[in-house]
Amino acid sequence: MKILITGAGGQLGREWVEFLGESEHDIVPLTSSDLDITNSDAIHSLFSEESPDLLLNCAAYTKVDEAEDHPEDAHAVNEIGVQNLAHACKRHRVYMVHFSTDYVFEGSETDHKKLPNGYDEEFPPAPQNVYGLSKRGGELAIEKFADKWMIIRVSWLCGKYGNNFIKTMLRLAKEKNTLRVVDDQTGSPTFCFDVVKKTMKLVEMDRTGYYHISSKGATTWYGVTRELIRLTGSKTHLEAVSSSEFEMKAERPAYSLLNTQKIEELGLEPIEWKKGMNVMLSQLNELKA
């Protein structure tokens, strides 16, 4: 199978390149400098030249706060760019797999009480910031314009490549004596190594539609950091604070837990988040070696 990977320079894209590089598949990794997904002509030209069977779209605008000031940039990549890819996939008969986010949901405390097991794939989206709106726009574009597609939603994405919360906390724990971390946002981290394995299983099953991939167990950012400090033996003092302590332009969801029952029914068991963090730390240590 010939597979195009857009966004191949990002944390999830790089994980895909490594994972598929050890397979029998023919992969074409494309960074943002290789392919501008806002350029429809460039996409069609590439698809004509490469004749792929599968597209893994990891390209995304992910600057959540900056999106509030530059909504046109977020929508250009996350909505218009995705629409361009969807058109190309339909025209060239390519199976489209796209990665979306928990930010498409409202994330309110009311939802937290109503949905103790998290948002399932059928729950009506209601994004509360520009980033979430742009990602939902991309989802709708795929529904409208692609033929064969699968949308994977993830939350609190973390991996050994790129920038993410866990890597930031590891750095800060070495630099600071005290860390103040929000304890009023509930969800569960999703690990890149787990996303690629489970998504590939879904592709092999020829699945279509929406799927949620995340870890087992709910926690907060404070809870994630506390476990990180325990695992690393850091002496940094940890302080739980309210999100109101930090001034951010974009509203963050208070509740981000994704329900994974749909993949569980297909035999794909979510990894427990503490175990996932342990695996990720081992991967980071291997990179340093």
Image (tube, grey):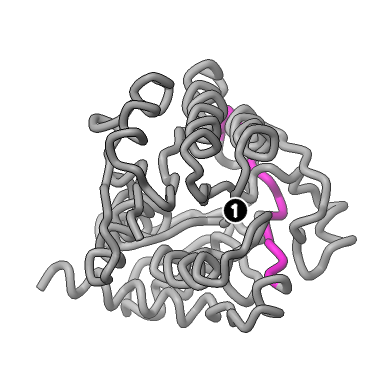
Q: Quadrant of residue 215?
A: bottom right
The residue at 54%/30% (across/down) is: 87
Q: Amino acid at mark 1?
A: Met
**What span is colored magenta in the figure?**
247-260
The residue at 50%/21% (across/down) is: 76
- Residue 121 is situated, as x and y percent measured from the top left of the image, at 74, 57
The residue at 75%/64% (across/down) is: 118
Q: Quadrant of residue 154?
A: bottom right
Look at the image and tell me whether residue 66 can be seen: no
Q: Is residue 249 magenta?
A: yes
Q: Is residue 285 above or below residue 25?
A: below
Q: Is residue 263 magenta?
A: no
Q: Quadrant of the C terminus?
A: bottom left
Q: Is residue 120 above or below residue 42?
A: below
Q: Is residue 41 above or below residue 176?
A: above
- Residue 288 is situated, as x and y percent measured from the top left of the image, at 13, 68
Which residue in the structure is indicated by mark 1? 150
- Residue 200 is situated, as x and y percent measured from the top left of the image, at 46, 67
For mark 1, give the secondary structure: strand
Nearer the observer, 210 or 127: 210
Position of residue 136 in the picture relative to residue 28 (left or right):
right
Q: Quadrant of the N terminus?
A: bottom left
The residue at 57%/22% (across/down) is: 68
Position of residue 127 in the picture relative to residue 94 (left or right):
right
